[in-house]
Amino acid sequence: KALELGRRLPDMRGKTYKLNVLSSLPVAGWVKNGTTPAGAADEIKNKPISDLAWQGKDLVAEEIAVIIPVSLNTLRDVENYVDIVPEITEQVVGAFQQVIDATIFFGVGSPWAGFNGIVADATTAGATVSWNGTSGVSFYNAVNDAMEKVENSGFVPTAILGGPSLNSAFRKTITELGVLAGDQGEIGALPRHIDLTGGFNQSSAFAIVGDFRYLVYSFREEMEMRLLEEATLVDPSTGSTLYNLAQQDMVAFRFTMRLGAAIPNPVTRFGGQLNSGSTNIVAGAAAYPCAII
């Protein structure tokens, strides 16, 4: 879901992809409100001066991988064993999807410095809405409040994402409001995405509302499979040998992928604030393109 909702940038040509992100916006003003230079005529005014600043951020390619050893006898004994390769590949795709979603949404095992996952970074920005599903704020109002936090940062909510229980929450909302599904207005029309990869932990966040255009990623290498026939596989935590493929009549399927992801979070006029000199708008501490429920 992270890759579906996010914006794919051109593929990386090296380990690092440089991003230029707006870090401050210029502030304009009326010339007639300026200060007349000493000794100048009244009609000669100083025009205000401001800057436009860019901050460099990096996408860093990190690797996801798995090796699956299989006995040759097992392959031979499976009817139409050649078809087992697409089955293995399909399961590995699901495993990679789970890793990517868990990392980007919840920061699980994040290899990217400064990116702790959307939920953690939204919490740091104060973009959280309390809702326990049983009492207090209705889910409808919770979604509205989350959208408001995104909008007040200068972004536009493009989708709401959650686990399987998200659909149930919307169905209950229909009951609470006494309306049909098509009558839920802007909240009901917000594109709804259900994450079934297993990477969305609803005990940490029930849903994420966000402007997912600002979730960007780039591939250094898309998923690749290589067949290993004579390798020795060791336990990465202990270094002890697990399998000797040639000696034990085995093969192994090695899958790898390299990509980088980030939320650049550029400054916006609604989410920014004047700096101490009041000559530029800089990013506000609470500005973030996503909010969590």
Image (spheres, rainbow, N blue to C red):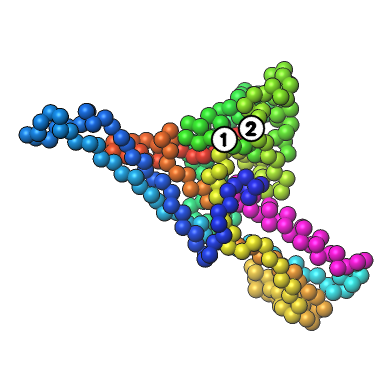
| C-alpha span from label 2 to label 1 | 8 Å
- Numbered mark located on residue 41 in the image: none
Q: Residue at x 34, y 45 (%)?
A: 52
Residue indicated by mark 2: 190
Q: Is the magenta stretch mostly helix, strand or loop?
A: helix
Q: Residue at x 49, y 39 (%)?
A: 288
Q: Where is residue 179 in the image (x, y as percent from the top left)?
A: 72, 19
Residue drawn at the location 47% of the way across and 44% of the way down: 265
Q: What is the secondary structure assignment of the residue under circle 2?
A: loop
Range of the magenta residues?
Answer: 79-108
Judged from this view, the residue extending furthest toward the top is 178
Give the labeled residue for mark 1. Answer: 157
> Which residue does the image show at 69% across and 21% down from the upper left?
183
Is residue 65 depicted above or below 146 in this figure? Answer: below
Q: Where is residue 94 in the image (x, y as percent from the top left)?
A: 73, 54
Residue 65 seen in render? no
Amino acid type assigned to the residue bearing label 1 in the image:
Pro
